Amino acid sequence: MTNQLHMLQAWITPALLQDGAVIGNPTSTTTGQPSTAPAAVGGDQAATTQGGFDMFLLILLMFGGMILIMSLTGRKDKKRRAQMLKELGKKDKVRTAGGIIGTVIEMKDDEVLLETDRASHTRLWLAKGSITSVVKQAKTHSNDSSEEEATTTNA
């Protein structure tokens, strides 16, 4: 509580003492008579400065810690998202940033063909980066090519 008062005093006192009076001076500058103000209000200038510096360091450390935590969390999310996009394959059911849910039909380097409605055969080309989550992953991606080959030879 005392440190908070000293910190408050450090900000308010220069504005109140525009005539150049020293903070710890118990005499009034206008009359030369002893001041009737309590001695605790004046305080020591060095203690006030040290308290302000300590408060500044505490705030600076808290701000630095907050930035560190946010950057570590961001890296973790970025890695998870990159892994999800890397494992993305045909027949996965995905959700996009726009809220579109569809099944992956075809993939290129940075584009994905989604089938949103099987009955009307509605398909959309979207950027691969717009996919936010995989709703349902296909059973196996390695067997997709062998299944396609089997269906084409039977047809």
Image: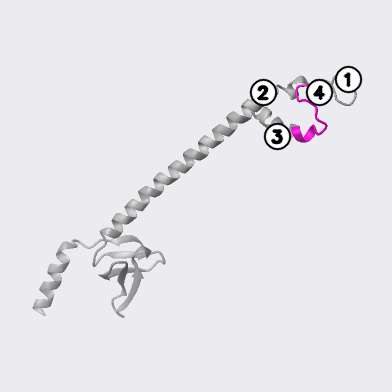
Q: How many marks?
A: 4
- Residue on which the image places disc 4: 37
Residue neighbourhood size for the residue with mark 2, other residues' Cα within 10 Å, grouped as few (<14), some (14–19), many (≥20): few
Q: Secondary structure at mark 2?
A: helix
Q: Where the C terminus falls, by quadrant? A: bottom left
Q: Nearer the viewer, residue 139 or 112?
A: 112
Residue neighbourhood size for the residue with mark 3, other residues' Cα within 10 Å, grouped as few (<14), some (14–19), many (≥20): few
Q: Secondary structure at mark 3?
A: helix
Q: Residue at x 76, y 25 (%)?
A: 23
- Marks 2, 4: nearer the viewer: 2
Label 3 or label 2, whichever comes before in sequence order: 3
Label 2 or label 1, whichever comes before in sequence order: 1
Q: Quadrant of residue 94?
A: bottom left
Q: Secondary structure at mark 1?
A: loop
Residue kind at label 1, given as amino acid type: Gln
**Label disc, if present, on residue 33 of the rendered structure:** 1
Farthest-out residue, front: 20
The boundaries of the magenta stretch are 14-25
Farthest-out residue, right: 31
Label 3 or label 1, whichever comes before in sequence order: 3
Q: Where the N terminus falls, by quadrant? A: top right
Q: Secondary structure at mark 4?
A: loop
Q: CA distance from mark 3 to mark 2?
A: 14 Å
- Residue on which the image places disc 3: 11
